[in-house]
Image (spheres, grey):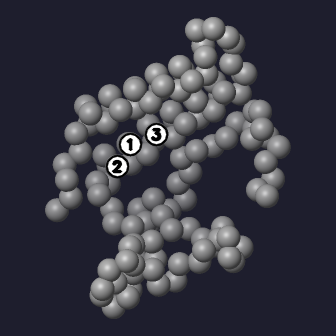
């Protein structure tokens, strides 16, 4: 069985991360670019949605293609089989390795603000 998730500790970690991001933006001494706030909101929303899915579905094992291969017997268990490394083969960028329960989910949805609007995937 997997470890029980301490949700209070998880929420505290998210709050600490948010505080660190705000500090890194220099909100005390300067005005951050508008898109930094947008990106932060998008990341926060993605974390909240992913957390809700973890609560709903519990611990879902990653597919065999993503499981570790650095031990004896991994190949026999099918670990790493079918994985396409996207930087060697562009088809790898199109693969969907999410478990069945989460297929079709998108957690991070960029607003197109700042440099994200200029990103064409290259």
The structure residue drawn at horizontal position 43% and vertical position 45%, both measured from the top left corner, is: 50
The structure residue drawn at horizontal position 73% and vertical position 21%, both measured from the top left corner, is: 33
Secondary element at image label 1: helix
* Residue 120 in the image: above or below residue 79: above
Secondary element at image label 3: helix
Secondary element at image label 2: helix
* Residue 75 in the image: above or below residue 90: below
Q: Position of residue 107 (x, y in %)?
A: 54, 46
Of 108 and 76, which appears nearest the observer? 76
**Real-space Cα separation, disc 3 to disc 1, in angstroms:** 6 Å
Question: Where is mark 2, residue-wise?
Answer: 54
Q: Dot 3 surroundings within 10 Å: few (below 14), some, or many (20 or more)?
A: some
- Tell me, for residue 26, which label it has, or none: none
Q: Dot 1 surroundings within 10 Å: few (below 14), some, or many (20 or more)?
A: some
Query: Can you say which quadrant of the picture contains the C terminus?
Result: bottom right
Query: Can you say which quadrant of the picture contains the N terminus?
Result: bottom left
Question: Where is mark 3, residue-wise?
Answer: 47
Q: Position of residue 30 (x, y in %)?
A: 67, 11
Of 90 and 20, which appears nearest the observer? 20
Contact (CB < 8 A) between labels 3 and 1? yes
* Residue 24 in the image: above or below residue 28: below
Q: Residue furthest top?
A: 29
Residue 74 location, quadrant = bottom left
Residue 70 location, quadrant = bottom left
Of 47 and 101, which appears nearest the observer? 47
Question: Where is mark 1, residue-wise?
Answer: 51
Contact (CB < 8 A) between labels 2 and 1? yes
């Amino acid at each position: 069985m997997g470890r029980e998730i301490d949700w209070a500790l998880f929420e505290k970690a998210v709050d600490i991360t948010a505080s660190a991001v705000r500090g890194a933006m220099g909100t005390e001494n300067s005005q951050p670019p508008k898109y930094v706030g947008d990106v932060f909101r998008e990341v926060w929303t993605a974390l909240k949605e992913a957390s809700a899915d973890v609560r709903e579905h519990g611990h879902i094992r990653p597919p065999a293609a993503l499981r570790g291969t650095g031990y004896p017997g991994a190949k026999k268990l099918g670990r790493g089989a079918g994985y396409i490394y996207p930087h060697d083969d562009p088809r790898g960028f199109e693969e969907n390795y999410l478990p069945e329960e989460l297929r079709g989910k998108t957690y991070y949805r960029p607003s197109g603000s700042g440099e994200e609007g200029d990103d064409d995937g290259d």
